[in-house]
């Protein structure tokens, strides 16, 4: 198994194309063609984590946060980032980061938080836009069924709770092949009229390569006519944050105690208590103050995230209970998610969960 094999499986869980523009995801250190001796899963790649990988004979670190976020102008070991990169290169250890690609994945960071809280009826809080595309192509009428089915099998035509979705229009196509052409219908040098079907299907943008390969493999024409456009529709299966419900309501103090226990933290910073029951809860791992307005709009009773600033607690405006559990605490379940996923995909291979706590914040 090589590094790229592991990356391919991780991209099935969280396509890197879904990461935020500001982020730095993917293979950050190493060669994608290197053979893998073992995989160490961590939340952050610190020097102690690289030492752990060396000790446990793992030459691939799968990290949630990227160790390289901004460009490096030198490698002298003067910062912890430089020391991590230098040591990884010296020991031929590859580092892969998944970060906001997993934040935006349907079964990613926020789904894992909801699972820990026992929330049901989960939905994406802030659906992503620009990740749904539409393919329209034209095929001989008698071949339309075969091509359409192949596109469905490749992942096209899935919309929310529905699959095998398409729009089809029958019409007449014309063409005239030159002396170098090799038409499958009609004769070169003659104008040909043929009954055709225009097939339109939507698909997730991360599937574009697979969809196009399927189109060319199953289309019989020498020259395949097609167009792809990006839709402005929100993608209900991709996006930041998640919202769900408890089976039964909790009072606010009971809720905050439950949150404190679930996230294993000694401190939950929260906004003013409103003396209202808690049932509908929004969550977002990491720094999530930007989504307070989305949680309010979604009529959540409470919103769990991290890194709220002083004045941001005022934005609750007696409409919602804000709970800041801490950045590390909100994302702590992520490495277990990655570990479980990789262990299932590579059941006979050495997948190791890092024992190092990478939380830089301490409490007294």
Image (spheres, rainbow, N blue to C red):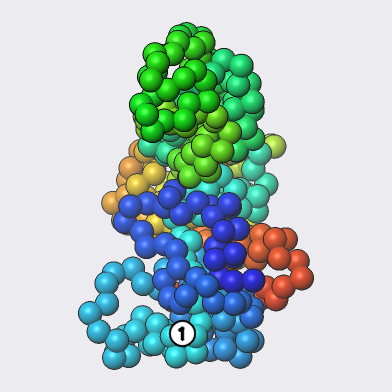
Residue 246 placement: quadrant: top right
Q: Position of residue 364 (x, y in %)?
A: 48, 78
Badge 1 crowding class, 10 Å Cα cut-off, few under 14, some 14 to 19, many 20 or more, is many
Residue 77 placement: quadrant: bottom left
Q: Please indicate, yes or no, whether residue 146 appears anywhere in the rendered image.
A: yes
Q: Position of residue 293 (x, y in %)?
A: 37, 38
Residue drawn at (62%, 32%) of the image: 150
Q: Is residue 196 positioned above or below 322 on the image?
A: above
Q: Which residue is mark 1?
A: 88
Tell me if 189 is positioned left or right of 209 in this view: left
Frontmost residue, 246 versus 351: 351
Frontmost residue, 25 versus 37: 37
Frontmost residue, 240 versus 193: 193
Frontmost residue, 169 versus 50: 169
Q: Is residue 241 positioned above or below 348 on the image?
A: above
Residue drawn at (28%, 51%) of the image: 311
Q: Please indicate, yes or no, whether residue 255 appears anywhere in the rendered image.
A: no
Residue farthest along the right direction in this orientation? 348
Q: Is residue 268 positioned above or below 219 on the image?
A: below
Q: Secondary structure at mark 1?
A: helix
Tell me if 176 is positioned left or right of 182 in this view: left
């Amino acid at each position: 198994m090589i590094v790229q094999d592991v990356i391919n499986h991780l991209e099935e869980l969280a396509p890197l194309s879904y990461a935020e523009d500001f982020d730095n995801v993917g293979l950050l250190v190493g060669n994608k063609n290197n053979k893998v001796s073992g995989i160490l899963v961590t939340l952050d790649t610190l020097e102690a984590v690289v030492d752990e990988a060396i000790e446990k004979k793992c030459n691939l670190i799968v990290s949630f946060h990227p160790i390289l976020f901004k460009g490096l102008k030198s490698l002298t070991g003067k910062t912890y980032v430089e020391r991590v990169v230098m040591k990884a290169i010296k020991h031929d250890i590859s580092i892969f980061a998944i970060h906001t690609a997993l934040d935006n994945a349907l079964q990613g960071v926020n789904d894992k938080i909801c699972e820990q809280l026992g929330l049901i009826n989960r939905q994406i809080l802030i659906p992503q836009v620009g990740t749904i595309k539409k393919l329209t192509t034209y095929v001989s009428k008698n071949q339309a069924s075969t091509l359409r089915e192949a596109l469905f099998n490749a992942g096209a035509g899935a919309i929310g709770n529905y699959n095998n979705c398409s729009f089809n229009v029958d019409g007449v196509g014309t063409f005239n092949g030159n002396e170098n052409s090799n038409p499958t219908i009609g004769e070169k040098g003659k104008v040909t009229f043929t009954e055709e079907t225009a097939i339109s299907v939507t698909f997730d943008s991360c599937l574009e390569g697979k969809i196009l390969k399927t189109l060319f493999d199953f289309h019989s024409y020498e020259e395949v006519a097609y167009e792809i456009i990006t839709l402005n529709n929100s993608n209900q299966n991709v996006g930041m944050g998640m919202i769900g419900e408890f089976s039964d309501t909790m009072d606010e103090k009971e809720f905050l105690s439950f949150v404190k226990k679930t996230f294993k933290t000694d401190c939950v910073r929260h906004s003013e208590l409103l003396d209202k029951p808690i049932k509908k809860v929004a969550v977002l791992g990491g720094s999530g103050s930007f989504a307070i307005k989305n949680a309010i709009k979604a009529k959540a009773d409470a919103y769990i995230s991290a890194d709220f600033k002083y004045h941001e607690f005022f934005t609750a405006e007696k409409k919602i209970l804000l709970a800041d559990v801490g950045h590390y605490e909100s994302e702590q379940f992520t490495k277990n998610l990655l570990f479980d996923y990789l262990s299932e995909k590579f059941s006979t291979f050495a997948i190791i969960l890092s024992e190092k706590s990478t939380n830089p914040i301490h409490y007294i």
